[in-house]
Amino acid sequence: MREALFIALKDLRLLVRDRMALFWALGFPVAFALFIGSVLSSSVARESVRLPVAFVDSAETDASLRLKRELDANQSLVVKTETSPDAARDAVRRGHALGYVHLSAKGETEFGVDPSRASEAALIKAALSAALVTVSLPEASPVVAVPLSEVAVIRSGAPPNAFALVFPAAIAWGLMGCAATFAVAMVAERTGGTLIRLHAAPLPRASIVLGKALACTVACLVDAAALLLIARVGFGVRAPDLSMLALALFSVTACFVGLTQVLSTLGRTEQSVSGAGWATLLFMAMLGGAMVPVSLMPEWMQRLSDLSPIRWGIFALEGALWRGFGLRDLLLPCAILLAVGALGFTLGLRITGRREA
């Protein structure tokens, strides 16, 4: 264990001395949060965005079909048909839609929203109300004539400002910077002969692997903690339950530690690993909602976003920071993150072991 700590301290000292690594780990995430948060804070930025809405037609009447057509014709909405109210609520919980409309068999219209997106919810409500008025003609079925009821389907927590929406993605960017930096450093040690000298020393291979994993873990946790401190002090972003935040951070960190091990095997030189590593991370970031919110993506891309571990990392951090998730809500995203981390770490070790053999 002492040998592992020695190796971890060595790697952390090298990280602190690398100014470019510090920029990607701290500087860029803060700049990203400031820029995107400021844009989201402006109401002008929301005017040209089409808002995704889940639609469930349990009534299946002529009037309900006409209501669906009216919503489809609205240029500010993207209507996605779901098979059941539970599926629609789940789409909102997972960020695939900003609200849902359910026409029940009893002739009731239920409107559910994500309370974290109050301004968009107001626009959706206005569009739905206008559509109800349009189709409420004398010959229309009573299903569309009933009063509109509002039901909040997400947790009661809501972000205090636009920066709370952005900082989970900013933390993901910071951890991507840490992962890329450690992956390149591992290759540099292999090509520079440092790793050979470590293996030649009376050190167990397990201590070397554990030391590097420990260094990456500490760097990711410190980076995330620093960004959370900036979010709290500078922008008023506070987690309602620190234990849930700790669980989310541990899971996200474990995932990136595993990804680091895989990224280090994408090439045999520092340049190739840096290029291939960042290309891989950027692709996962684009697909996972670190650049564009998942709710604004096309439906087919939203389904693909579930394949990106960054998608689940952002979702877990959102749940811990402002969605008010409890242990039950965090089980799925955290389990996926831990599984990806374990798989990546194991796969990376096997590939590295074969190359060194």
Image (cartoon, rainbow, N blue to C red):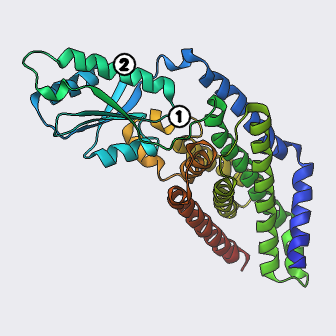
Crowding at mark 1 (Cα within 10 Å: few <14, some 14-19, many 20+): many
Mark number displayed over residue 223: none
Please name whichever residue, 213 or 352, is drawn nearer the observer in this view of the structure: 213
Q: Quadrant of the C terminus?
A: bottom right
Under mark 1, the amino acid is: Ser
Provide residue 126's location: percent of width, then percent of height. Answer: 36, 19
The answer to whether one can see residue 349 in this image is yes
Provide residue 79's location: percent of width, then percent of height. Answer: 31, 31
Separation of disc 2 and disc 1 at Cα?
17 Å
For the point 39% across and 31% down, the residue is: 52
For the point 78% across and 73% down, the residue is: 210
Provide residue 278's location: percent of width, then percent of height. Answer: 67, 47
Under mark 2, the amino acid is: Ala
Above/below status of 60 relative to 130: below
Crowding at mark 2 (Cα within 10 Å: few <14, some 14-19, many 20+): few
The answer to whether one can see residue 267 in this image is no
Q: Earlier in the sequence, mark 2 or mark 1?
A: 1
Q: Residue furthest left?
A: 139
Provide residue 274's location: percent of width, then percent of height. Answer: 72, 50
Mark number displayed over residue 116: 1
Above/below status of 162 relative to 332: above
In the image: residue 340, left or right of residue 211: left
Looking at the rendered structure, the secondary structure element under dot 2 is helix
Instruction: Give the residue pinned by disc 2.
Output: 126
Looking at the rendered structure, the secondary structure element under dot 1 is loop
Above/below status of 63 relative to 290: above
